[in-house]
Amino acid sequence: MGSISIWHWLIVALIVSLVFGTKKLRTVGGDLGSAIRGFKDAVNTETAGGNPEPAVTPQPKAATQEISG
């Protein structure tokens, strides 16, 4: 009684496809897939050092005048 069989999942899938339509579900699936792919690419570039720290350029030393007193 507590477990959900394969027939329950098939009926739910049928109802969802009737309500939303297959074209809408295909679009949502494609959007979800591209979002996951983008997330994986961002994680991989972050761990591989894709965003290196900016190089530090040496600042010219300002001419200082010593005041003799």
Image (tube, rainbow, N blue to C red):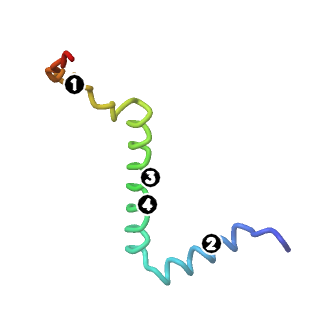
Estimate the x, y position of residue 39 in percent, counting from the top left.
42, 49
Name which residue type carries label 3.
Answer: Ile
Specify the label residue 57 is tagged with.
Answer: 1
The residue under the point 33% across, 31% down is 53
Badge 2 or badge 1: first in the primary sequence: 2
Q: Nearer the viewer, mark 2 or mark 4?
A: 4
6 to the left or right of 67: right
Name which residue type carries label 2.
Answer: Leu
Q: Is residue 5 above or below residue 63?
A: below
* Cα gap from disc 4 to disc 3, whole angstroms: 6 Å
61 and 37: which is toward the camera: 61
Residue carrying label 2: 10
Residue carrying label 4: 32
Q: Is residue 18 above or below residue 42?
A: below
Name which residue type carries label 4.
Answer: Leu
Residue carrying label 3: 36
